[in-house]
């Protein structure tokens, strides 16, 4: 496992990543383009299902406001700085593709229903039928100027059978599902993609930030109990609600840590830098927890006398804005019919803003739900930087986990397609799968040949052969990138 420097306030020392030879999982990079920071984290799953961090870099964000890219040049410069710091932590990395988090005021969501009628109803429902059902949802009407970011199936139905997590393997004529569709402004999406691509990177996929954060801080028990993920970022607060194992709602609340800083600046008449420092060092989400006789001394500007700020007044300002944000959370929960008795998992607070003192108590008071801080360390392997267990990196780590899910789904889908082919093969000869590998323009064909043997073990041997061949192929591609 990679050894990384853990010295406070210093960039990670340059080291060479070492992973076990049997680790065939790809290196995945998450890029969090936020209002206050841009973070790039590279990692891959180890043999124990834990995430090994192979590189980490961050930079102060410029050009992003409330989650939206407003100045492309400044954003490109910040992304490049974050990548440069990531390469410093591991010079052996070669980053070409990234999973990017997206949020902002422009994000919307809607619920839809889709159904298809199968012509070939003699056979079992396959993944191909599910893909067709999901593809049809791209025809859903959305406002002009918006585009679909993600289509998330909730529960499926097959004929008269409802509440299915997956219809694959069932027999039936009519297959349907409820969908949660996430949309965003076309220009805002184009700007974030352009910023990443002009930084010499390819956007592998855009992932809604609260869904990425949820992947990093949730466990199976949370999913079963029902939780509300509240990711308090610099420009926005993102909400994702899960109930009975299903994503029920997402929302973007147009307030975050930057709004609190601005409130302090205006309300107390101080510089922005002083407002941010006071929020972090002395801020509290509950005014009653601060004594009225405590004061903070702020240096005067250009010879002016120092200014004394009441800690109690500071907490009052923070509490007012945080209460407003939590009122929005309560409003969205009521809109989807989930009261405080239904979400047994309560509220999971994450993001940089979740580190405010006494925020858990305020959240429980306003929402009537139990609350806790969500840390992304549950999925991290031992030996990572302690800094990465900070809630502010939940989104970035969640992006890597989402990328791993996509990789595993693609691998399983490819295996299933080849399984269907082998069912038609008897003794005619080997099954040959042709794919391509290589970089840049020249791609050489790679042939994986699996010869079925006689007897009942043919299918199992075939699946194992295909999986081994595909994993070796991915491994060769990763080795080629690192060489």
Image: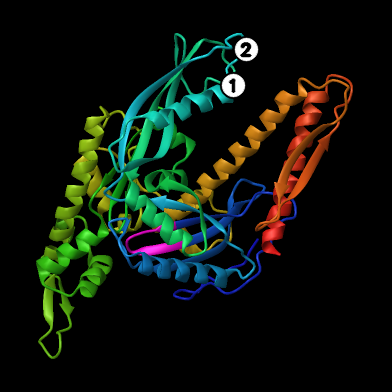
Q: Position of residue 39 (x, y in %)?
A: 44, 62
Can residue 227 be spotted in the picture?
no
Colour style of the rendered protein structure? rainbow
What percent of the width, then of the height, locates residue 204?
Answer: 52, 50
Q: Quadrant of the N terminus?
A: bottom right
In percent of the image, x 51 and y 25: which residue is there?
132
Residue drawn at x 72%, y 30% is: 418
Q: Is residue 248 above or below residue 290?
A: above
Q: Which residue is mark 2?
A: 123
Q: Position of residue 318 (x, y in %)?
A: 18, 58
Residues at marks 2 and 1, CA–CA distance in whole angstroms: 9 Å
Quarter holding residue 343: top left
Magenta residues, as a range?
32-39
Rate crowding at label 1 as few (under 14), some (14 to 19) or many (20 or more) other CA atoms within 10 Å.
some
Is any atom of residue 80 visible in this view? yes
Q: Name the magenta segment's main secondary structure.
A: strand
Q: Is residue 242 magenta?
A: no
183 left or right of 8 in image: left
**Front in this rendered view, residue 19 or 457:** 457
Up the image or down, 25 lies above or below 313; here it is above
Where residue 268 appears, as percent x and y from the top left, is 11, 69
- Measuring 26% from the left and 71% from the top, which residue is drawn there? 277
- The quarter of the rendered structure image containing the C terminus is bottom right
The secondary element bearing badge 2 is classed as loop
* Residue in front for this viewpoint, 482 or 437: 437
Q: Residues within 10 Å of mark 2 (few under 14, many from 20)?
A: few
Q: Which residue is mark 1?
A: 126
- Helix, strand or loop at mark 1: loop
| Residues at discs 2 and 1 in contact (Cβ within 8 Å) | yes
Would you say 306 lies left or right of 182 here? left
User: Looking at the image, which residue sits at the far bottom?
Assistant: 303
């Amino acid at each position: 496992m990679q050894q990384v420097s853990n010295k406070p306030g210093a960039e990670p020392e340059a080291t060479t990543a070492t992973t076990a030879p049997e680790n065939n999982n790809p290196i995945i990079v998450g890029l969090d383009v936020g209002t206050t920071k841009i973070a790039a984290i590279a990692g891959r799953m180890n043999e124990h299902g834990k995430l090994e961090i192979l590189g980490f870099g961050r930079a102060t964000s410029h050009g992003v406001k409330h989650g939206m890219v407003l100045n492309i040049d400044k954003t490109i410069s910040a992304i490049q700085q974050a990548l440069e710091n990531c390469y410093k932590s591991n010079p052996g990395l070669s980053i070409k593709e990234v999973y990017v988090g997206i949020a902002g005021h422009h994000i919307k969501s809607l619920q839809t229903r889709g159904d298809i009628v199968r012509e070939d109803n003699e056979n079992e429902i396959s993944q191909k039928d599910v893909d067709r059902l999901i593809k049809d949802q791209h025809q859903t009407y959305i406002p002009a100027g918006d585009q679909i970011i993600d289509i998330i199936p909730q529960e499926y139905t097959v004929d008269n059978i409802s509440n299915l997590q997956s219809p694959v393997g069932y027999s039936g004529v009519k297959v349907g599902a409820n969908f949660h569709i996430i949309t965003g402004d076309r220009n805002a999406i184009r700007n974030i993609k352009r910023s990443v691509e002009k930084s010499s990177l390819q956007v592998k996929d855009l992932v809604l930030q609260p869904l990425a954060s949820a992947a990093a801080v949730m466990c199976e028990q949370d999913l079963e109990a029902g939780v509300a993920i509240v990711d308090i970022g610099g420009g926005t607060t993102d909400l994702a609600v899960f109930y009975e194992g299903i994503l029920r709602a997402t929302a973007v609340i147009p307030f975050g840590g930057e709004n609190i800083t601005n409130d302090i600046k205006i309300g107390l008449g101080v510089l922005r830098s002083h407002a941010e420092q006071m929020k972090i060092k002395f801020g509290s989400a509950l005014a009653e927890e601060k004594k009225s006789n405590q004061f903070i001394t702020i240096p005067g500007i250009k010879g002016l006398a120092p200014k004394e700020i009441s800690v109690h007044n500071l907490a009052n300002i923070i509490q007012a804005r945080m209460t407003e944000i939590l009122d929005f959370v309560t409003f969205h929960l009521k809109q989807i019919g989930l009261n405080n008795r239904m979400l047994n998992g309560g509220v999971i607070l994450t993001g940089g803003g979740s580190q405010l003192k006494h925020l858990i108590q305020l959240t429980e008071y306003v929402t009537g739900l139990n609350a806790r801080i969500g840390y992304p360390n549950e999925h991290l392997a031992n030996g990572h930087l302690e800094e990465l267990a900070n809630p502010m990196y939940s989104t970035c780590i969640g992006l890597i986990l989402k990328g791993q899910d996509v990789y595993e789904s693609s691998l399983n889908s490819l295996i299933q397609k080849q399984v269907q082919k082998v069912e038609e093969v008897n003794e005619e000869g080997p099954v040959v799968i042709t794919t391509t590998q290589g970089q840049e323009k020249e791609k050489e064909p790679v042939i994986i040949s699996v010869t079925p043997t006689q007897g009942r073990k043919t299918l199992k041997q075939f699946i194992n052969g295909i999986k081994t061949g595909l994993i070796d192929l991915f491994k060769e591609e990763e080795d080629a990138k690192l060489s």
